[in-house]
Image (cartoon, coloured by chain):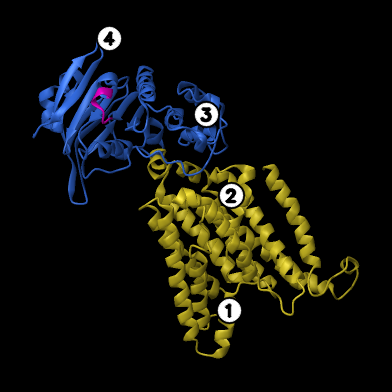
Chain colours: A blue, B yellow
Amino acid sequence: MSSLAVNALTLTLGGRRVLGGIDAAFQPGRVTAVLGPNGAGKSTLLACLAGLRTPDSGEVVLDGQRRAAIPRRDLARRIGLLPQTADVHWDVDVETLVALGRYPHRGRWGESPADRAAIASAMAATDVSQFAARPVTSLSGGERARVLLARVLAGAPEWLLADEPLANLDPAHQLDALDLLRAVATAGAGVIVVLHDLNQALRVADAVLLLRAGQVVAAGPPDEVLTPQRIAETYGVAAHIGTTPGGQRYLIATHREPR
Amino acid sequence: MSRLSLGLLAAIVLAASASLLAGKVWVPFEAFVSDDPRWQIIAELRLPRTLLALLVGGGLGLSGAVMQGYLRNPLADPGLFGVSAGAALGAVLSLFFGFASGWLLPAFALAGAAAAMAILALLVGRSGSIIVFTLAGVIVSSVAGSMTALAISLAPTPFATTQIVTWLMGALTDRSWDDVWLALPLIAAGSALLALTGRTLDALTLGESAARSMGVDPLRLQLLVVAGVALCVGASVAAAGVIGFVGLIVPHLVRPFVGHRPSAVLLPSALAGALLLLVADVAVRALPSVSELRLGIAMSMIGGPFFLVLLLRMRRNLA
């Protein structure tokens, strides 16, 4: 069973304490939503988990091993990151882009059958197979987001880290993307996703890590963590939480409330 | 090897034959098989010149393709972005101090190219903006250029001034086997380093964060690019002076055939660069003019308008 945890993580950037001693443990096979207001340290935490930033103190522990001791390529095979910026600098076709996800796996002599199978199944899972040959620039925002997710899935990571993957998607594509994250977790990977929309977290998350100013406010099941009182403390808004006739929890911020 | 690369190879063989025949003295085919003294022109002048055109063109084409991939900037070019200017400054300093011969001039040129490329590479980690890099390249280029001008104005003798100015206008005229033996190992080593960057450049298509999360070692890539470009461009400038635009033009010419994936562009760019420079050199020799048109000037006359067209086509994306 794979495990990922952070212990007493601190990081100061440009004189600002972005992470002030974060402890958290993540579960495989589950979707963990990282929530918090702007500047809470969500993206920085993800960057530390993915090995893009080195914390000042504390450590990231993957399967009982300190991250700093894991070779770069090995780490890249086990942790896949979907960054917030959806940059694609060259107008390559969709299949070429998805194939980039095999970078940490590929040998010196080109694609193996395993590589090709992983690429095909990632494209099938995200439903982008039908435009395999199309240039990336010809895609709509929703299609592009799915292709970028397919790139990460092609690497078959044990952990999928996604930084606001739903930005720029219309409601239908947001639901599709949430279902996809759910499916990735059901297939066994641990999914850690930074979200801004609390409704999305209520819909998809098995666990929530709520941050504010580089500190953990609360961690646990979404229903327990996302209480009106805690939302007021963390975001400075009054929240109404309800349940639809279909049983889906929802949350509306009604007005600002000084914390 | 792609069909494009095979086609380019065939074209290079044809152009190389033309290069051996063309010039102020047209050497007929019979001269190749007899004791004709014109054979000397072929063996001692045109053969090294042809090889040098291929080496320099290939090195510049490959450097341009790698720089475009690494900086994620389709306008990148060793000439425009100041790497050639850095190499030229190094070379001019060595001429200024009177170390014109042997390995010192190329060593100075390599150091200059490496310094300019290192400045660009340091900037690449900070920001992904095409405009920032293009401006940085222009600044590196103009600072190196004005320091070169300073060296010229302070040159100790009129002879040194003439030597520097003539050499700055890139050319392949009257190059000997010595120049070939100087450039060959350096450009071969540089190209080998640059060839190692291909798949990593592909990963950079997704931006720096994604590439690093996929296991790209940014420091290793930076060292490969700086050392490879410095070797190729430094040796090219040492052997042939400043010849711009080759590295800018050829990646754009090959992309419609091989796609935009950076690693797919590398080999065809090297071949197309070799072909372009060889054809241009044959053309400046064959043009009926009083004195030969300098190759560096000819390339700028082709490259300037090409750059403008490219800018016009990119204008929408940059705005």
Residue B176 higher or lower than A27, as above or below: below
Task: Tell me the CA gap for discs 3 and 4.
Answer: 41 Å
Q: Which mark is residue A246?
A: 4
Q: Is mark 4 in CB contact (under 8 Å) with mark 1?
A: no
According to the picture, the residue beneath numbered tag 3 turns out to be: A115
Residue A197 in magenta stretch = yes
Q: Residue furthest left?
A: A258
According to the picture, the residue beneath numbered tag 1 turns out to be: B101
Who is closer to the viewer here, A147 or A30? A147
Mark 3 Cα shell of 10 Å, populated few (<14), some (14-19), many (≥20): some
Task: Tell me the CA gap for discs 1 and 3.
Answer: 53 Å
Look at label 1 and name its amino acid: Ser
Q: Is residue B216 left or right of residue B66?
A: left
Task: Tell me the CA gap for discs 4 and 1.
Answer: 85 Å
Q: Is mark 2 in CB contact (under 8 Å) with mark 4?
A: no
Residue A153 in magenta stretch = no
Write down the quadrant of residue B304 in the picture: bottom right
